[in-house]
């Protein structure tokens, strides 16, 4: 269930036994690092290591030191006595022996993950363990490829604390009011005695109930450090432990970090580890929030990631773990500092190569008889079937390869299979099997389990393409990234051409999806086309659905210019699909989102353009009802909050935009605000001359706070205009519909 280093050369392993006991075992395990370079220089380095007592031993072995080469090199394998000083020793070795002579490998692989890779283990694997003292021996009775595995029953508890705080800001110095622990079948509230008694009672209950998983809200960023601080203030810090291993918690408040991905900033909190248990902070986990515990267990098993790390790791890090495991088993060393630059390209080569996916601009307006077809996992499948990986694209061993990249002319290796395709093979097979099991399942419970597992794998597959071009990705390379794009462009063009040959009109196309139109075409006819295209291009083309109608929308900035991913429509079965409109945006207030969705639901009752246009007056009448509620201040403030992510720290903003003003309000109130955090605020007076009075941060709201009616009416009208603008209902025309009972509303 859990694994982590204890002594410098020992690993602690927690096992759940068949009779439901939790057993702590210890295994001797030495971390290893590697040095590659000239053989004579490596021999000199071996002599230097022999004089260093911290590096216990070294030996020559054969490994793949250079990913781009098909053959192995003789490298120096070095045993590190204390895993905590690995980086220190690495820098010292380079400093003593010469930076230009050697490359070091496997430096930054965590000991717990190295242990899983070496022993071929994974979280919640079923196995037999033989304990021979300080050494464990394993017989694996399970496989990470399995889709019908059964996990042991895990005991869980939800930890929460009520704090005696004055004002909106909770501080470490505020005292504990009560502590609650929601167990599987009961809730325990600890509110008797002084603070010390409450904390010690929590320790006692956790020890007696012995949960495997402890859930918290903001446990990493505040709750756990707060409890540790209160324990220290009461002189019982050494007795405060929630881990199975009786390791006291520290009150040190670790700083989180800000990450930048695709031009956006994200904030993550430092993990608070409970040794022998799994701590899941629901405010600091992506996979668990998206796919639940079943999804978390699935990616942990498949990608060899400890559960506590998988709960907090990015999708890219989880996928990297599987790649590292495959590299480890193939004797491929992981360089400490990636040194594989992008190959030189002329300006004309860049124009051809750096083009991304192919798109057909949508034909604006209302359409019927439209089918949406989608290539199943196109990019991952291309990487798998075309053997696309950093070491296989433009390889030196197959210059005359028959597998050539369209337009670019790059050769792809035919002698070895890349690490990236090996990784994707397992992920794609498992996800396909889960989707098949979902269709076969008769009961809702197994169906939901399979769905959670396939959804978790889907996130990894979605990430794999972008990670292939990421400059710091272990097995990424720009040439491999643009190779995938070149193949996808070629396939989409072939699919569009075949569709037109069979009498379909291409209404829209984007990267791996096509919207095709043919009068009175049945689903069976579209499926026949999909099967023919699939056979031709080697990737399955699926029918996503046939629309009752679909509306493609123009840009709000450039009049009449189509936007690639901005539309709303209704499938034949009544299911609504929306993209790029307010109801899909995370920064849209809940009230605006619900009104826009209600408008679409009413429009979805139409079947033709005539009946659609006949529905518009009815939709506008309902819009007017909601506008009146807004004017009469009948809308709850919580439904009007706007959520924005900070791209930089509050002090770094030059312009007085709303989220910056709200962030500065929170800073002034004593909150810690960083780039990457999301800020919620209410517009209270958008016309105020003082910028700081235009909005109010959500955490500072009072019962007497009032919202800016005009500003929210603008947003409501804009959301309506998004849906109806292409039918001649611009902002002015919609505004006229909202003038009711002689109330003159100024909408600017």
Image (cartoon, rainbow, N blue to C red):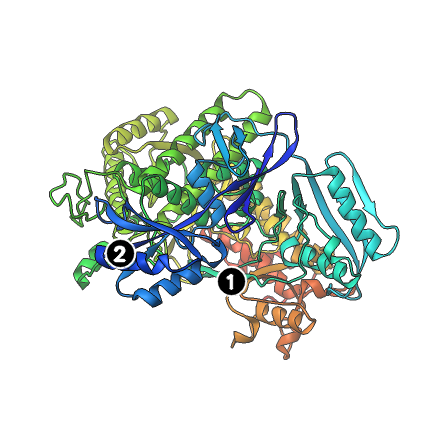
Q: Is residue 220 visible?
A: yes
User: How many C-alpha atoms fall within 10 Å of the one at disc 2: few (<14), some, or many (≥20)?
Assistant: some
For the N terminus, give its image quadrant.
top right
Out of 216 and 209, give the one closest to the viewer: 209
User: Residue 434 placed where, x, y %?
Assistant: 46, 29
What distance separates the C-alpha of mark 1 from that of mark 2?
A: 42 Å
Q: Which mark is residue 708?
A: none
User: Residue 25 placed where, x, y %?
Assistant: 58, 38
> In the displayed image of the protein, which residue is found farthest to the right?
193
| 1 or 2: mark nearer the eye | 2
Q: Which mark is residue 43?
A: 2
Horizontally, residue 537 falls left or right of residue 17, namely left
**Residue to which mark 1 is pinned:** 258
Q: Residue at x 76, y 34 (%)?
A: 185
User: How many C-alpha atoms fall within 10 Å of the one at disc 1: few (<14), some, or many (≥20)?
Assistant: some
Q: Residue at x 34, y 27 (%)?
A: 527
Q: Residue at x 72, y 47 (%)?
A: 159
> In the displayed image of the protein, which residue is found farthest to the bottom?
689
User: Residue 430 placed where, x, y %?
Assistant: 42, 31
For the C terminus, give its image quadrant.
bottom right
> In the displayed image of the protein, which residue is found farthest to the left?
400
Out of 319 and 289, give the one closest to the viewer: 319
User: Residue 362 placed where, x, y %?
Assistant: 35, 48
Q: Earlier in the sequence, mark 1 or mark 2?
A: 2
Out of 310 and 44, give the one closest to the viewer: 44
Q: Quadrant of residue 2?
A: top right
Is 158 drawn above or below residue 677 in the view shown? above
Q: Secondary structure at mark 1?
A: strand
Q: Secondary structure at mark 2?
A: helix
Out of 316 and 347, give the one closest to the viewer: 316
Q: Is residue 605 visible?
A: no
């Amino acid at each position: 269930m859990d694994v982590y280093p204890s002594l410098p050369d020992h690993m602690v392993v927690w096992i759940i036994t068949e009779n439901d006991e939790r057993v702590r075992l210890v295994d001797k395990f030495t971390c290893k690092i590697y040095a590659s370079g000239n053989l004579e220089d490596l021999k000199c380095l071996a002599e230097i290591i022999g004089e260093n007592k911290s590096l216990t031993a070294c030996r020559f072995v054969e490994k793949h030191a250079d990913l781009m080469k098909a053959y192995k090199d003789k490298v120096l394998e070095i045993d590190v006595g204390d895993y905590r000083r690995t980086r220190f020793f690495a820098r010292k070795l380079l400093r003593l022996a010469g930076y230009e002579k050697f490359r070091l490998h496997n430096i930054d692989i965590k000991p717990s993950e190295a242990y899983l890779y070496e022993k071929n283990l994974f979280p919640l694997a079923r196995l037999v363990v033989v304990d021979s003292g300080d050494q464990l021996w394993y017989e694996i009775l399970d496989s990470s490829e399995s889709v019908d595995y059964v996990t042991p029953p895990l005991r869980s508890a939800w930890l929460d604390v009520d704090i005696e705080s004055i004002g909106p800001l909770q501080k470490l110095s505020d005292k504990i009011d009560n502590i609650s622990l929601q167990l599987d079948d009961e809730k325990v509230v600890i509110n008797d005695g002084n603070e010390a008694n409450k904390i010690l009672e929590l320790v006692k209950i956790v020890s007696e109930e012995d949960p495997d998983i402890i859930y918290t809200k903001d446990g990493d960023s505040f709750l756990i450090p707060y409890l540790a601080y209160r324990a220290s203030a009461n002189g019982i810090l050494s007795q405060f432990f929630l881990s199975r291993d009786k390791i006291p918690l520290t009150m040190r408040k670790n700083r989180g970090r800000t990450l930048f991905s695709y031009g956006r900033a994200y904030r993550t909190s430092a993990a608070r580890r409970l040794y022998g248990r799994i701590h899941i902070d629901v405010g600091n986990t992506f996979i668990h929030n998206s796919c639940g515990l079943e999804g978390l267990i699935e990616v942990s098993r498949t990608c060899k990631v400890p559960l506590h790390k998988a709960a907090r790791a990015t999708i890219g890090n989880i996928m990297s773990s599987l790649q590292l495991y495959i590299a480890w088993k193939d004797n491929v060393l992981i360089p400490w500092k990636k040194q594989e630059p992008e190959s030189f390209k002329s300006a004309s080569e860049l124009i051809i190569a750096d083009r991304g996916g192919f798109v057909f601009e949508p034909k604006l307006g209302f359409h019927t008889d439209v089918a949406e077809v989608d290539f199943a996992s196109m990019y991952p499948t291309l990487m798998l079937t075309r053997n696309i990986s950093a070491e296989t694209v433009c390889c030196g061993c197959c210059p005359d390869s028959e597998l050539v990249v369209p337009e670019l002319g790059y050769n792809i290796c035919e002698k070895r299979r890349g690490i990236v395709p090996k990784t994707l093979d397992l992920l794609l097979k498992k996800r396909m099997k889960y989707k098949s099991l979902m269709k076969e399942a008769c009961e809702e419970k197994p169906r939901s389990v399979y769905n959670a597992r396939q959804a978790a794998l889907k996130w990894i597959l979605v990430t794999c393409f972008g990670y292939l071009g990421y400059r710091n990705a272990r097995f990424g390379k720009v040439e491999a990234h643009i190779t995938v794009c070149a193949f996808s462009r070629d396939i989409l063009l072939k699919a569009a051409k075949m569709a037109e040959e069979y009498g379909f009109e291409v209404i829209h196309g984007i990267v791996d999806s096509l919207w095709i139109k043919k009068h009175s075409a049945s689903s069976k006819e579209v499926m026949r086309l999909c099967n023919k295209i699939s056979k031709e291009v080697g990737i399955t083309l699926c029918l996503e659905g046939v629309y009752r109608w679909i509306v493609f929308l123009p840009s709000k900035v450039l009049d009449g210019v189509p936007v690639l991913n901005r539309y709303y429509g209704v499938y034949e079965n009544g299911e609504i699909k929306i993209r790029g409109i307010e109801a899909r945006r995370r920064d849209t207030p809940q009230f605006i989102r619900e009104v826009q969705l209600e408008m679409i639901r009413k429009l979805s009752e139409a079947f033709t353009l005539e009946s659609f246009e006949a529905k518009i007056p009815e939709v506008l009448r309902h819009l007017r009802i909601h506008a009146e509620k807004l004017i009469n201040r009948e809308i709850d403030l919580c439904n009007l909050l706007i959520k924005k992510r900070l791209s930089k720290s509050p002090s770094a903003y030059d312009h007085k935009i709303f989220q910056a003003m709200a962030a500065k309000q929170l800073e002034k109130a004593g909150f810690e605000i960083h780039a990457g955090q999301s800020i919620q605020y209410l517009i209270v007076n958008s016309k105020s001359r003082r910028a700081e009075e235009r909005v109010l941060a959500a955490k500072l709201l009072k019962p007497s706070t009032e919202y800016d009616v005009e500003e929210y009416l603008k947003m409501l009208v804009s959301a309506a205009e998004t849906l109806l603008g292409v039918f001649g209902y611009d902002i002015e025309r919609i505004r006229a519909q909202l003038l009711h009972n002689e109330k003159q509303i100024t909408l600017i």
